[in-house]
Image (cartoon, rainbow, N blue to C red):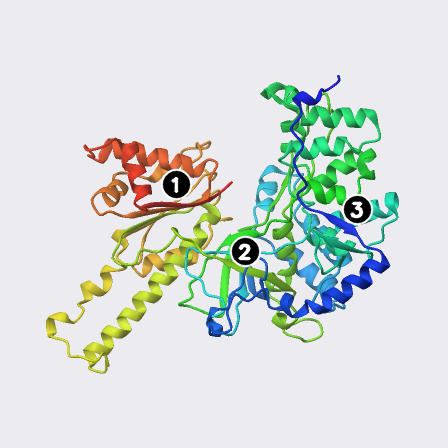
């Protein structure tokens, strides 16, 4: 059927521009570039000449060049893939500036796919696709240059995967005779870069398409009338207005289709120009990860925890896309990090050449993303409720490490006071000396409750040792649930989530002790279910007469006593 323009999304202005340069343009730009080199070099430093070097900091535009210090699986995951990648690929590769080549990276990713198949037994598939890594990054030697607090995130600059980059470069050469080494000016920049650099680093080839305008734009480049019509159907409102006939949802959203997949599925669109790609594609967004460490433990490193994105899409049942097979989807950042961390994951200590792992580790571009609300209370005695199933537990590990370090520091000062070696500058009366009860009050487990949930106790109980240690230290009380483990006497139990073990004691903490509630993790279901459960419990046990349970929760949010760090 014909698709009129009236049911298509409006055409937006260009997101970016890209101009191929001639030899004369290159010469002129090189001259201008030399005259601006000093300014370009200083763009990353936010400091006036009269300001001390402590004012310098790293940003998304000018990130810090870090490297991996350590890594481990937090899940019960085999390290055989990491061993094979380390011994047969990374150790055999001659790298320049610690950069792993595209061929080696592609081979390494294939090794991981071989060791973690997703098309066999459902139980094995589930465990193979559920891989969580803890990774530690190096920070500058001068700790004033990169500062963070528990609750912050770290941004990671990523590039497009090599297979996608090769496809686009091959397409541009075949249809337009453009060589990867030709130079281009992006957004009118005075500093030209190569076509390969532009395709690899400047446009997002890997994110699933969410904007139908891209489909309409590609339809304009299609030389095959049927392909153009199909793209217009996918982009239209008429054919995507209900669940039974939503071809955009069934094809694009369910299959996590990227612009590269579109160009492969609709080959007549491959005549699109480089400026055409830049006009409709956004820049590559950084990936953000919650910090799971405390600067009180180490100011020279920073730790994060993340799930390796790896899953199969469903098969399509749409008549328009009949026979469209499911495909494997992997995270652009997380699968790259897994490969680069292979030597650490398998326990290697040096490279085959005898070099230390840190000295041969590829560079990782990172920058801080401070949090405004997701912060520990100023007073250590303030009660806390930490709700973090899955990798949502990561920032709370940093919280608890920080609290433990603070408690140890308090003990040290108290001991100095008792021994008379403290040099505080004035005398203390006996009643001012901290008692044992005072020393424990800031970390009393009765006033810090942690709710953690995962699928299987023997596979993805993240940070189990650390959490049990915090409990033994009297730092917290732990509530943990396993949603897919069979319970005794219940061969087919219904899934059990963190909200299912919340009860009257939680309400007591919230209402009577004014606890701050922190929620971290999935924002699509978990965060909503937790809030609904808290409202339900407030109605049953809260004895909140001056307002409704929902109003009480809303008031907590306004007072920053209920804060969330969630993602979709």
| Total residue callouts | 3
Q: Earlier in the sequence, mark 2 or mark 1?
A: 2
Q: Which residue is mark 3?
A: 167
Q: Residue at x 74, y 67 (%)?
A: 95
- 545 is higher (above) or lower (below) than 124: above
Q: Which residue is mark 1?
A: 498
Q: Which mark is residue 322?
A: none
Q: CA distance from mark 1 to mark 3?
A: 44 Å
Q: Tell me whether the residue at label 1 lies in contact with that at label 3, contact meaning CB atoms closer than 8 angstroms.
A: no
* Residue 74 visible at all: no
Q: Nearer the viewer, mark 2 or mark 1?
A: 2
Q: Tell me whether the residue at label 2 lies in contact with that at label 1, contact meaning CB atoms closer than 8 angstroms.
A: no
Give the percent coordinates (x, y) of residue 564.
40, 45
Assess disc 3: are there few (<14), some (14-19) or many (≥20) residues with their C-alpha within 10 Å of its C-alpha.
few
Q: Which residue is mark 2?
A: 155
Give the percent coordinates (x, y) of residue 217.
72, 33
Determine whether the residue tagged by mark 1 lies in a helix, strand or loop.
Answer: helix
Residue 418 location, quadrant: bottom left
Determine whether the residue tagged by mark 3 lies in a helix, strand or loop.
Answer: helix
């Amino acid at each position: 059927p014909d698709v009129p323009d009236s049911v298509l999304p409006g055409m937006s202005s260009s997101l970016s521009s890209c101009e191929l340069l001639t030899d004369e343009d290159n010469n002129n730009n090189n001259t201008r570039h030399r005259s601006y080199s000093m300014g370009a070099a200083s763009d990353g430093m936010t400091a006036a000449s009269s300001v001390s070097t402590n004012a310098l900091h790293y940003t998304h535009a000018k990130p810090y060049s870090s490297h991996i210090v350590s890594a481990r699986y937090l899940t019960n995951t085999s390290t055989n893939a990491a061993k094979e990648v380390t011994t047969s690929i990374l150790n055999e590769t001659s790298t320049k500036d610690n950069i792993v080549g595209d061929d080696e990276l592609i081979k390494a990713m294939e090794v991981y796919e071989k060791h973690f198949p997703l098309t066999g037994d459902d139980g094995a598939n589930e465990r193979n696709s559920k891989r969580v890594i803890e990774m530690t990054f190096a920070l500058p030697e001068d700790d004033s240059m990169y500062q963070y607090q528990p609750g912050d995130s770290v941004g990671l600059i990523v590039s497009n995967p090599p297979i996608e980059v090769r496809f686009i470069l091959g397409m541009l050469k075949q249809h337009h005779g453009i060589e990867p080494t030709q130079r281009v000016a992006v957004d009118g920049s005075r500093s030209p870069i190569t076509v390969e650099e532009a395709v690899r680093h400047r446009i997002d080839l890997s994110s699933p398409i969410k904007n139908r305008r891209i489909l309409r734009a590609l339809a304009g480049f299609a030389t095959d009338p049927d392909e153009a019509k199909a793209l217009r159907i996918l982009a239209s409102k008429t054919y995507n207005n209900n669940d039974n006939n939503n071809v955009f949802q069934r094809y694009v959203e369910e299959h996590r289709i990227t612009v590269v997949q579109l160009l492969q599925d609709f080959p007549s669109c491959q005549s699109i120009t480089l400026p055409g790609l830049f006009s409709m594609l956004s820049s590559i967004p950084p990936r953000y990860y919650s910090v799971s460490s405390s600067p009180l433990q180490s100011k020279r490193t920073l730790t994060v925890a993340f799930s390796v994105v790896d899953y199969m899409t469903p098969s399509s049942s749409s008549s328009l896309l009949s026979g469209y097979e499911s495909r494997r989807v992997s995270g652009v950042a997380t699968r790259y990090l897994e490969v680069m961390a292979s030597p650490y994951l398998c326990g290697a200590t040096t490279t085959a050449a005898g070099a230390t792992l840190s000295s041969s580790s590829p560079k990782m571009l990172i920058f801080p993303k401070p949090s405004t609300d997701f912060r520990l209370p100023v007073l250590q005695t303030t009660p806390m409720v930490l709700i973090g199933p899955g990798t949502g537990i990561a920032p709370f590990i940093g919280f608890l490490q920080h609290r433990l370090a603070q408690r140890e520091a308090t003990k040290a000062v108290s001991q100095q006071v008792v021994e008379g070696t403290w040099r505080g500058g004035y005398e203390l009366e006996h009643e001012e000396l901290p008692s044992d009860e005072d020393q424990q009050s800031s970390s009393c487990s009765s006033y810090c409750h942690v709710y953690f949930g995962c699928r299987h106790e023997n596979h993805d109980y993240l940070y189990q040792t650390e959490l049990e240690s915090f409990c033994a230290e009297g730092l917290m009380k732990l509530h943990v649930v396993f949603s897919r483990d069979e319970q005794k006497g219940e061969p087919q139990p219904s899934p059990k989530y963190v909200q299912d073990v919340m009860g009257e004691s939680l309400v007591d903490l919230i209402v009577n002790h004014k606890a701050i509630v922190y929620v971290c993790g999935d924002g699509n279901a978990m965060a909503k279910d937790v809030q609904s459960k808290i409202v339900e419990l407030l109605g049953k046990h809260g004895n909140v007469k001056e307002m409704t349970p929902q109003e009480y929760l809303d008031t907590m949010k306004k007072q920053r006593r209920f804060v969330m760090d969630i993602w979709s």
